[in-house]
Image (cartoon, grey):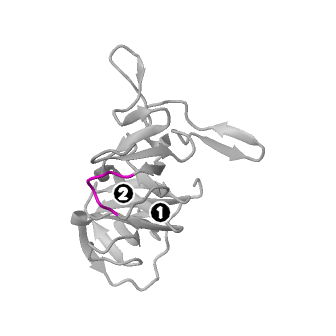
């Protein structure tokens, strides 16, 4: 089945990423269905829309919005699927709910998005991470920044993702405020809990 404007996807793995393998045991990290941090954001494309042309093809891995696979409770306490739910392990996804896609083991961001690696702070007075600055990891041709550029962005414009066990921020291109001259002396910040 193909939608007119929506992709059809299935979760890569399960709907939730709330377990971690430690040795031969499996540890449950979270048992709440409404916590967005443990919802799986990676999906496999089953079909592409008929009326939208993109570089995303059937079989590609995509990073999507956290509400696609999430379940919730209605006002009567009944557990429900998201509005994206189609049928068992199949979901409709609009193009604006897709942020990255993987083709031939390489990630590509969709227009208007870039993904930024946070930087480690050397100051004992600040947080462990330098706020509002990062190194571009994934970008696209429509954004005037390249991979490995050091950029600044506006407050509250970053949204955290875990991509290939690396913590990255998704930043819309309109929230990029400055491109710095990056000399390579800054250290990336990737906490050990990942």
Range shown magenta:
48-54
Res. 156 image quadrant: bottom left
Please rate how many residues cluster around mark 1, counting C-alpha atoms within 10 Å: few if below 14, some from 14 to 19, many from 20. Answer: some
Residue 80 at x, y percent in the picture: 40, 24
Q: Is residue 11 rendered magenta in the image?
A: no
Residue 134 at x, y percent in the picture: 38, 69
Provide the residue designation for mark 2: 99
Provide the residue designation for mark 1: 102
Residue 63 visible at all: yes
Q: Nearer the viewer, residue 188 or 124?
A: 188
Residue 35 at x, y percent in the picture: 44, 36
Q: CA distance from mark 2 to mark 1?
A: 11 Å
Q: Secondary structure at mark 1?
A: strand
Asked whether the residues under the numbered discs 2 and 1 touch, taking CB atoms below 8 Å apart as contact, a structural biologist would say no
Residue 127 visible at all: no
Please rate how many residues cluster around mark 2, counting C-alpha atoms within 10 Å: few if below 14, some from 14 to 19, many from 20. Answer: many
Q: Is residue 178 left or right of residue 102?
A: left
Residue 26 at x, y percent in the picture: 70, 39
Above or below 74: residue 139: below
């Amino acid at each position: 089945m193909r939608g007119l404007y929506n992709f059809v996807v299935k979760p890569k793995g399960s709907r939730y990423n709330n377990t971690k393998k430690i040795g031969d045991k499996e540890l449950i990290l979270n048992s709440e269905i409404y916590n967005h941090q443990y919802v799986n954001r990676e999906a496999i494309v089953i079909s592409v829309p008929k009326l939208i042309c993109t570089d995303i093809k059937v079989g590609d891995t995509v990073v999507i919005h956290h509400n696609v696979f999430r379940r919730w409770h209605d006002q009567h306490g009944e557990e429900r699927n998201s509005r994206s739910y189609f049928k068992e392990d199949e979901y409709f996804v609009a193009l604006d709910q897709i942020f990255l896609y993987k083709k031939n083991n390489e990630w590509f961001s969709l227009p208007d998005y870039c993904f930024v690696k946070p930087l480690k702070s050397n100051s004992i007075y600040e947080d462990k991470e330098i706020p509002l600055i990062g190194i571009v990891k994934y970008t696209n041709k429509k954004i005037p920044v390249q991979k490995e550029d050091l950029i600044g962005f506006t407050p509250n414009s970053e949204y955290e993702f875990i991509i290939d066990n690396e913590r990255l921020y998704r930043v819309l291109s309109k929230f990029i405020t400055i491109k710095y001259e990056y000399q390579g002396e800054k250290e990336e910040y990737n906490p050990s809990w990942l």
